[in-house]
Image (tube, rainbow, N blue to C red):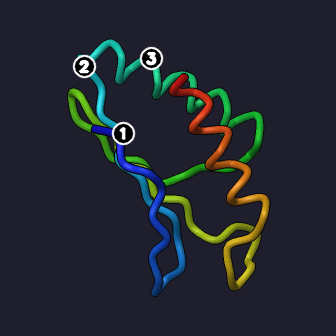
Amino acid sequence: MNQPWKKRQRPERLERRVEFTDYQATRDFLERLNELSEEKRCFPDISFGRTYVNLTLHVSNNNKDLNENDYNFTHEIDSLLK
């Protein structure tokens, strides 16, 4: 079950857990995420296991709060899952 992005405080960040059917699907997603991250120069914190990936996106560019760019990046990550 894939969870939607959740906004957390202290420090402000967005988090999401994505689950996959097998290791190959997890690996494929991580490879696509790497390409997107390199292209956008935005690198979420990632932890993963065989069939899941946990993502944390912290406030970017020394801002104090999440901004439109951060939310746009989450939408681009979501599009990798379609």
Looking at the picture, which amino acid does disc 3 mark?
A: Asp
As drawn, is 40 to the left or to the right of 49? right
Looking at the picture, which amino acid does disc 1 mark?
A: Val
Residue visible at 49% across and 82% down in the picture: 11
Which percent across, then down, holds residue 56? 46, 58
Which element is circle 3 on?
A: helix
Residue visible at 70% across and 67% down in the picture: 60
Residue visible at 46% across and 24% down in the picture: 29
As drawn, is 8 to the left or to the right of 26? right
Q: Report the residue marked by disc 1.
A: 18
Q: Report the residue marked by disc 2.
A: 21
Image quarter where the C terminus lies is top right
Q: CA distance from mark 2 to mark 1?
A: 10 Å
In depth, the one of 78 and 56 nearer the eye is: 78
In depth, the one of 61 and 3 nearer the eye is: 3
Task: Count residues near mark 3 (Cα–Cα under 10 Å), then give few for <14, some for 14-19, many for 20+.
Answer: few
Tell me if label 3 and label 2 are in contact, CB under 8 Å.
no
Residue visible at 41% across and 48% down in the picture: 46
Task: Count residues near mark 2 (Cα–Cα under 10 Å), then give few for <14, some for 14-19, many for 20+.
Answer: few
Kindly identify which numbered label has been placed on residue 28. 3
Which element is circle 2 on?
A: loop
Above or below — where is 42 with respect to 1? below
Task: Count residues near mark 1 (Cα–Cα under 10 Å), then give few for <14, some for 14-19, many for 20+.
Answer: some
Upstream in sequence: badge 3 or badge 2: 2
Which percent across, then down, holds residue 10? 46, 87
Above or below — where is 13 with respect to 16? below
Q: CA distance from mark 3 to mark 2?
A: 12 Å
